[in-house]
Image (tube, rainbow, N blue to C red):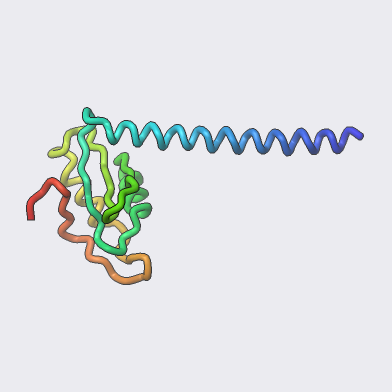
């Protein structure tokens, strides 16, 4: 009699733990979006070349210590990168990080990731 009750309690505990982990993750993503979309936060925006996966780019930037996200837009995918030291001080380190992101697209085709240009740059 006690074994089925313990089993049910274990299942409930697991479900609650998963729910809390997902909630924490959702709150963290919402906080990051709020921070990066704030007018007080300096950012660089990079429009991805066709075929480049925004998730791979965001992961590479975060691995290099930059907060980044890829907002859902109707146009070409782009990545917004936080510049805690200011745009000009972070521009070249972010550019170097972007130039070393994986060089294959969705279908395995080679991508040219050199000559990264941000949306605020001419050319």
> In this rendering, is residue 59 above or below 41?
below
Is 123 displayed left or right of 104 in the figure? left
User: How many marks are shown on the rendered structure?
Assistant: 0
Q: Residue at x 24, y 60 (%)?
A: 49
Q: Position of residue 97 (x, y in %)?
A: 25, 50
> In this rendering, is residue 35 above or below 120?
above
Displayed quadrant of residue 4? top right
- Name, please, the residue furthest toward the front: 74
Q: Position of residue 16 (x, y in %)?
A: 64, 33
Q: Residue at x 74, y 36 (%)?
A: 10
Q: Residue at x 80, y 38 (%)?
A: 7
Instruction: Name the quadrant of the N terminus.
Output: top right
> In this rendering, is residue 38 above or below 60?
above
- Name, please, the residue furthest toward the top: 40
Instruction: Name the quadrant of the C terminus.
Output: bottom left
Q: Residue at x 26, y 42 (%)?
A: 81
Displayed quadrant of residue 93? top left
Q: Position of residue 44 (x, y in %)?
A: 20, 42
Q: Which residue is nearer to you in this view: 117 or 63?
A: 117
Is 66 displayed left or right of 22 in the figure? left
Q: Position of residue 30 (x, y in %)?
A: 40, 34
- Name, please, the residue furthest toward the left: 122
Displayed quadrant of residue 33? top left
């Amino acid at each position: 009699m006690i074994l089925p009750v313990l089993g049910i309690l274990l299942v409930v505990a697991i479900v609650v733990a998963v729910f809390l982990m997902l909630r924490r993750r959702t709150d963290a993503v919402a906080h990051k979006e709020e921070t990066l979309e704030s007018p007080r936060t300096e950012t660089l925006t990079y429009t991805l070349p066709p075929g480049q996966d925004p998730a791979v780019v965001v992961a590479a930037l975060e691995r290099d210590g930059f907060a980044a996200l890829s907002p859902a837009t109707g146009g070409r995918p782009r990545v917004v990168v936080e510049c805690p030291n200011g745009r000009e001080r972070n521009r070249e380190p972010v550019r170097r990080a972007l130039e070393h992101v994986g060089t294959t697209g969705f279908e395995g085709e080679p991508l040219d990731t050199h000559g990264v240009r941000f949306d605020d740059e001419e050319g």
